[in-house]
């Protein structure tokens, strides 16, 4: 459901609210009863409710790692400053206050490195592993070949003319 | 599959690459043949290949809208400057070059507004609708009630002690 501008906005807004709550209930009940190995069909991006803390984290890391994997090999001083500013600003803006505080603590001990694609990619991998360890997960293997396979070729340039 | 530090890193890296390619092939073939209304089960976050341009876009908008929905009602000058800097920096760093150029064009015509939660939320909604129109999609209804239902209560504060 897309909510269009127009006179029916308020009524549609109520349906939107209910739709979001229903989606969250479905997700909280786990796997679909008829297809236990298949996650329930997600409602469309536009109609669902707020992301969970985990979904928000995955979105942020997806953006950050992909950005780093496609950062210039040798950044100019301006590009370097922009990346460092961006990452530091995120530490003050991230919607999960406790996560943001942990990220700022990490940056205080390990200042952002963004002189090159490799520096930024490896710095972010280390920062992500600090979160992984906190959450009892295994480390990701911080190697440029592995990081590139996971994040680099997002098809953005190939599709650039369609953007 | 998580890739752990250790001697088997290179072999695991190869499997990781192949796993990513397989995942992309599965996705490119569309719906699951046995359950056409249900998307194929995704591989885990750690083992798949790079996000598509569309997945990258959803991740970026998820972070931005949720950040805006939880931004202070009345931002301090420092918070305002941080948010404006963050959004502008993204225009120079976003991995899809054409998308980034369009975003910078939008910002040149509509400077980032971040004096409050409402200003930033509505500014981002307008920016997202500029992309929606370019992609032939309907506008999202830019109303704080609708935006809050979609993005605000991500459960981050409730779970803060677990972070």
Image (cartoon, coloured by chain):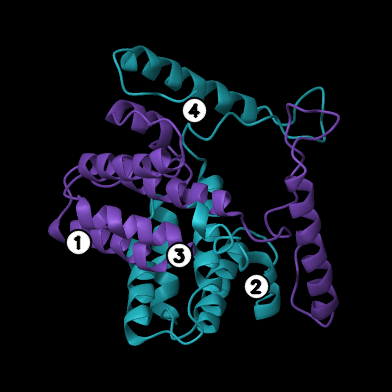
Chain colours: A cyan, B purple
Say whether marks 4 and 3 touch (CB < 8 Å). no
Query: Are the residues under badges 1 and 3 in a single subunit?
Result: yes
- For marks 2 and 4, the one nearer the N-term is 4
Q: CA distance from mark 4 to mark 3?
A: 28 Å
In the rendered image, the vertical position of residue A49 relative to residue A120, given as above or below: above
Specify few, some or many for label 3: CA neighbours under 10 Å numbering under 14, 14-19, or 20 or more: some
Q: Chain of mark 2?
A: A
Q: What secondary structure is marked by label 2?
A: helix
The residue where tag 3 is placed is B97
**Residue A36 seen in render:** yes
Q: Is residue B90 left or right of residue B77?
A: right
* Along the line of sight, the residue nearer the viewer: A56 or A144: A144
* Along the line of sight, the residue nearer the viewer: B95 or A16: B95
Query: Whole-percent x and y of residue B161?
Result: 47, 49
Marker disc for residue B144 = none
The residue located at (32%, 72%) in the rendering is: A85
Q: Chain of mark 4?
A: A
Of the residues tagged 4 and 1, which is closer to the observer? 4
Q: What secondary structure is marked by label 4?
A: loop
Q: CA distance from mark 1 to mark 3?
A: 25 Å
The residue where tag 2 is placed is A148
The residue where tag 1 is placed is B81
Q: Chain of mark 1?
A: B
The residue located at (77%, 43%) in the rendering is: B29
In the rendered image, the vertical position of residue A159 relative to residue A111, given as above or below: above
Marker disc for residue A47 = 4
Q: CA distance from mark 2 to mark 4?
A: 33 Å
Res B69 quadrant in image: top left
* Along the line of sight, the residue nearer the viewer: A20 or A154: A154
- For marks 1 and 3, the one nearer the N-term is 1
């Amino acid at each position: 459901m897309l909510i269009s501008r127009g006179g029916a906005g308020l009524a549609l807004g109520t349906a939107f609210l209910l739709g979001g709550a229903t989606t969250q209930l479905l997700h909280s009940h786990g796997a679909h009863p008829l297809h236990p190995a298949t996650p329930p069909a997600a409602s469309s991006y536009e109609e669902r409710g707020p992301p969970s803390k985990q979904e928000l984290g995955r979105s942020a890391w997806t953006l950050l790692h992909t950005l780093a994997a496609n950062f210039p090999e040798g950044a100019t001083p301006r590009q370097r400053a922009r990346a460092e500013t961006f990452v530091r600003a995120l530490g003050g803006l991230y919607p999960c206050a406790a996560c943001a505080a942990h990220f700022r603590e990490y940056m205080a001990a390990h200042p952002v490195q963004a002189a090159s694609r490799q520096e930024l990619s490896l710095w972010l991998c280390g920062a992500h592993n600090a979160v992984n360890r906190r959450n009892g997960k295994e480390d990701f293997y911080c190697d440029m070949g592995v990081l590139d396979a996971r994040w680099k070729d997002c098809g953005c340039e190939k599709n650039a003319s369609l953007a």
